[in-house]
């Protein structure tokens, strides 16, 4: 199978499991060879002549159950007549009962289905010599505590017990006290520490830009083969559907799919007919897929342990991997907490531009053309016709046409796409109008135009068409308006130079629902709208529409402070 030397967890665990009365708690990151660490010694100790379960492996998910059973079958290829049975919900319980009656040596099970078989008196655990709890913390999180207690109560007290996990939460302590006898604790690396071969990157973007950021990341890595983790089943399906509609090779995996659908999706993913698998955390455990390049967190999980297991899907068996998190400003604290626990620093990602993406994709195509294997015999008969058809084109023209044929859609998309702003962690309200040091980034207006600041934004329900109407209402005559840049609490817009003075004088004399309009030249202005609280009054358009119906003027000139005092 390609093993040349044992991995650290295997060196530690195998000698202990080959002995007797050795209870072990083993903490190691996923992808470090844990299945072989318990699988090889278990198989060596099986008495083939006794057709009764002698080893029991409990795991949280159907996927992990099947994966462990497949690995054990590979390890036991040259052990004649050894039987391994995966027992899990979602498949026929009758066929599992029939197999048990014929006799098996190793049972790999999810707690719920095994307890069902025990209640039916169809499985005998009296000869069990080794019990393995794989991903024990996840089984507790999924509510299997009572089932595990009921199962372990039926297992002989003289068995070896091995508890495996990548993390060690407090919930494990009760199991160790009740069912383990002076367990030896083995820690590969530090407790809860992430895999050192994984690079952790985060992109902090606005909530409405998360999907666009996901597409850019997927496009920037042409050979990506990874899992996108979402928080809910609904979000998982929605993201997968969007990716498929946008032409990505993706599918979803979540709890609402039938077992047949899940098996079908996983098979497609394992043979690389899918590039991207969009999944809930049910897939964070037990998806032992080789050579994943990326894990993408579409938002951070609630607990650090889930992040560890998610990222552990890549960078397995000594290979390198990348874990990317698409976050919003409220998740800044979670990033710091994860960094502290896994003892790794996150790298702040720079969102790739459309130009960067197109260049990366085209260079990847060139690499593929360079490395493609040409079957001279198969295409020899076709080449004369092809040469005649293309003889009027020179080499440069052919290269340009090949590239354009492959990438016209992507080039057109990114040619007109707006750049995604990465949110400034220290002041998200400024929306990157200022740099990390607080120095203002210079936004230059188009030639012949002047850039202005307005103290109304998206939270006031302001849209481009309403801003145009506001200018037209306040400033008589025709006014040419250039670029409009709407932010949450304020906006920027450009006016042709010749009208700038008139716009400045006229618009500052009006107010909306008692709130004065403030228009100022954008250059040199500091703290535009950054400290203003979110306005929860009716939307900008609704207020305007209401006044139109009542035939009131939507805009009125504000009184001076002296006139206001006189009225009071």
Image (spheres, helix red, strand yellow):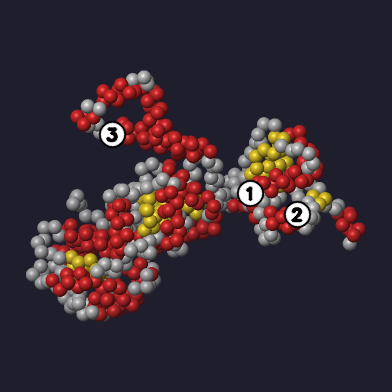
Q: Nearer the viewer, residue 122 or 191?
A: 122
At 48% from the left and 46% from the top, the residue drawn is 349
Q: Nearer the viewer, residue 424 or 377?
A: 377
Q: Nearer the viewer, residue 461 or 195?
A: 461
Sequence order check, earlier mark of 3 and 1: 3
Sequence order check, earlier mark of 2 and 3: 3
Residue at the limit of the structure toward the left, as seen here = 49
* Residue 474 as seen in the image, left or right of residue 532: right
At 53% from the left and 41% from the top, the residue drawn is 417
- Spatial CA distance of label 2 from label 3 is 67 Å
Q: Quadrant of residue 567?
A: bottom right
* Residue 405 as seen in the image, left or right of residue 30: right
Q: Which residue is mark 2?
A: 548
Q: Nearer the viewer, mark 1 or mark 2?
A: 2
Residues packed near mark 1 inside 10 Å, few (<14), some (14 to 19) or many (20 plus): some
Q: Which residue is mark 1?
A: 487
């Amino acid at each position: 199978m390609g093993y040349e030397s044992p991995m650290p967890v295997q060196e530690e665990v195998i000698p202990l499991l080959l002995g007797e009365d050795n209870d072990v708690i083993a903490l190691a990151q996923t992808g470090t060879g844990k299945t072989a660490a318990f699988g090889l010694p278990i198989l060596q100790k099986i008495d083939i002549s006794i057709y009764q379960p002698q080893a029991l492996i409990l795991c949280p998910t159907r996927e992990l159950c099947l994966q462990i059973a497949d690995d054990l079958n590979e390890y036991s290829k040259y052990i004649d007549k050894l039987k391994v049975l995966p027992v899990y919900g979602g498949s026929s319980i009758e066929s599992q009962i029939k197999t048990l009656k014929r006799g098996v040596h190793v049972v790999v099970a999810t707690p719920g289905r095994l307890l069902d078989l025990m209640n039916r008196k169809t499985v005998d655990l009296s000869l069990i010599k080794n019990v393995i709890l794989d991903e024990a913390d996840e089984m507790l999180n999924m509510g299997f505590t009572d089932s595990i207690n009921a199962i372990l109560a039926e297992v002989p007290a003289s068995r070896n017990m091995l508890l495996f996990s990548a993390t060690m939460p407090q919930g494990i302590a009760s199991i160790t006290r009740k069912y383990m006898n002076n367990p030896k604790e083995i820690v590969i690396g530090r407790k809860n520490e992430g895999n050192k071969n994984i690079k952790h990157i985060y992109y902090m973007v606005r909530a409405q830009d998360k999907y666009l950021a996901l597409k850019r990341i997927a496009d920037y890595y042409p050979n990506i083969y990874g899992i996108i983790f979402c928080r809910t089943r609904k979000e998982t399906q929605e993201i997968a559907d969007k990716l498929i509609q946008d032409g990505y090779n993706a599918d979803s995996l979540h709890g609402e799919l039938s077992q047949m659908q899940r098996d079908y999706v996983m098979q497609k993913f394992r043979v690389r007919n899918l590039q991207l698998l969009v999944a809930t955390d049910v897939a964070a455990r037990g998806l032992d897929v080789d050579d994943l390049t990326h894990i993408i967190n579409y938002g951070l999980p609630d607990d650090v342990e889930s992040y560890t297991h998610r990222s552990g899907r890549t960078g397995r068996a000594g290979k390198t991997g990348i874990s990317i998190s698409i976050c919003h400003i409220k998740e800044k604290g979670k990033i710091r907490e994860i960094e502290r626990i896994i003892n790794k620093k996150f790298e702040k990602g720079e969102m790739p531009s459309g130009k960067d993406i197109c260049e990366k994709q085209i260079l990847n195509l060139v690499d593929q053309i360079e490395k493609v294997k040409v079957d001279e015999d198969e295409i020899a008969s076709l080449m004369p016709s092809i040469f005649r058809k293309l003889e009027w084109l020179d080499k440069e023209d052919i290269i340009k046409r090949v590239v354009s044929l492959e990438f016209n859609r992507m080039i057109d998309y990114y040619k007109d796409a707006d750049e995604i702003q990465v949110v400034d962690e220290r002041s998200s309200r400024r929306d990157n109008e200022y740099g990390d040091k607080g120095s203002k980034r210079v936004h230059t207006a188009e030639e012949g135009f002047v850039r202005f600041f307005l103290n109304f934004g998206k939270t006031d329900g302001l849209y481009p068409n309403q801003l145009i109407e506001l200018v037209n209402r306040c400033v008589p005559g025709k006014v040419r308006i250039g670029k409009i840049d709407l932010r949450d609490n304020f906006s920027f817009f450009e006016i042709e130079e010749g009208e700038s003075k008139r716009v400045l004088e006229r618009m500052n004399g009006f107010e909306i629902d008692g709130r004065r309009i403030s228009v100022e030249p954008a250059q040199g202005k500091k703290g535009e709208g950054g400290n203003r609280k979110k306005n929860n009054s009716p939307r900008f358009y609704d207020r305007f529409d209401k006044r139109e119906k009542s035939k009131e003027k939507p805009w009125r000139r504000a009184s001076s402070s002296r006139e206001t005092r006189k009225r009071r």
